[in-house]
Image (spheres, rainbow, N blue to C red):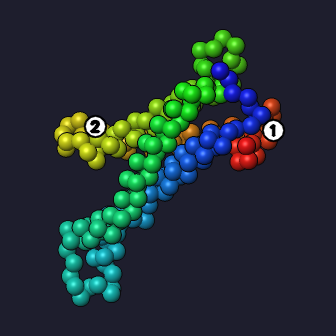
Amino acid sequence: MLEDRRYFTLIHRVIHWGIALTMLFILLTVLLRMGWMEKNGMAEVLTTSPQLEAYDISQEDAVKAAKSIRGNMFQWHLYAGYLMGVLLLARLAYTYSQGIFYKGPFNPQASMREKFQAWVYIVFYTGVALSVMTGLYIKFGPDDALGDIAKDMHVLALWYLVPFLVLHLGGIVLGENGKEKGIVSKMIGG
């Protein structure tokens, strides 16, 4: 059943914005971990800092200290991942109960734009599901060869999010300037 596009329900909007804000927070923790709070960079600051030169900190100890400093941030990454899992289940339950609001990629009545949009959503939610599942395996599964694959997949998951954000924002701009004027205000206010 296609949803009436004149408005979005409160549940739809809460799930949408919950996923959006949680993904942005997760992305922030990843970017901090890869950049400003990268363990080797932080270790170098600790070992070369004039204020700490009297302590003669080894590289190994500096890396341990850096990991400890960014440990709280990583905990927030985990909490956001758990929240993402809950939001994903809520999205699936909501979609199951209300139907999909867009035409599917194999619908012969769908335009090329609608088919493309459907594939973008399918790839995005598949990526989110894989991110959540691999994150849970990394946290709770055994540290084995499958765990190594899960870690690699989890890290690579970043690369579906960035293109999705670009496509999603581009779609919003096209929609606002095309057939779906006011879609942003509908997603905010209903």
**Which residue carries the number 1 mark?**
181
Left or right: 75 as drawn, with respect to 9: left
Given the current orientation, which residue lies at the most extreme top position?
108
Residue at 57% in and 28% down: 97
Q: Quadrant of residue 29?
A: bottom left
Number of numbered discs overlaid on the protein picture: 2
The three-letter code of the residue at mark 1 reads Lys
Where's residue 63, x and y in %? 26, 67
| Quadrant containing the N terminus in the rendered view | top right
Task: Report if residue 90 is visible in the image.
Answer: yes
Where's residue 51, x and y in %? 33, 87
Q: Is residue 162 above or below residue 105?
A: below
Residue at 24% in and 88% down: 54
Q: Quadrant of residue 163?
A: top right
Residue at 74% in and 31% down: 5
The three-letter code of the residue at mark 2 reads Ile
Q: Is residue 66 above or below residue 16?
A: below
